Image: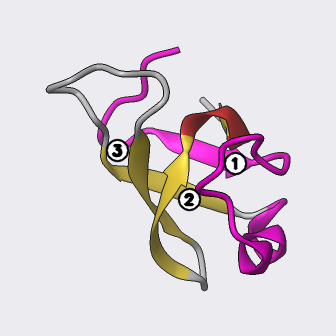
Amino acid sequence: MVFHKGQKVEVFKKSDDESWKTYMDDFIGSHGIITDPDSTINDPDALIEVSLLDKGTHRLPQDCLRPLD
């Protein structure tokens, strides 16, 4: 899946990516908006920037996200 800037997403599961940290477990179930997708490289394994409601902006692996639209 290719994510787009402004797209609404949910962190729906723990990522299998090595960049997933323990503190990110608290993000599961959170909703947010894609602020900086990795559209230049278009690499599904790359981290993308998501602004999470009440949790700030973070770079997250794509396999933990699903679109809400």
Up/down of 55 relative to 44, above or below: below
Are the residues tagged 2 and 1 within 8 Å (C-beta)? yes
Q: Is residue 49 left or right of residue 41?
A: right
Q: Is residue 62 left or right of residue 63?
A: left
Q: Quadrant of the C terminus?
A: top right
Q: Which residue is mark 1?
A: 10
> Could you tell me residue 38's position as x and y percent?
28, 35
Q: Is residue 39 left or right of residue 22?
A: left
In the image, what residue type sits under mark 3? Gly
Q: How is the image coloured?
A: secondary structure
Q: Is residue 5 left or right of residue 61?
A: left
Q: Which residue is mark 3?
A: 6
The part of the chain drawn in magenta is 1-29
Residue 22 in the magenta stretch? The answer is: yes
Up/down of 58 relative to 43, above or below: below
SS assignment at label 1: strand
Up/down of 54 relative to 37, above or below: below
Residue drawn where x is 57% and y is 36% of the image: 62
Residue drawn where x is 60% and y is 85% of the image: 54
> Could you tell me residue 11's position as x and y percent?
72, 51
Q: Residues within 10 Å of mark 3 (few under 14, many from 20)?
A: some
Are the residues tagged 2 and 3 within 8 Å (C-beta)? no
> Could you tell me residue 58's position as x and y percent?
46, 69
In the image, what residue type sits under mark 1? Glu
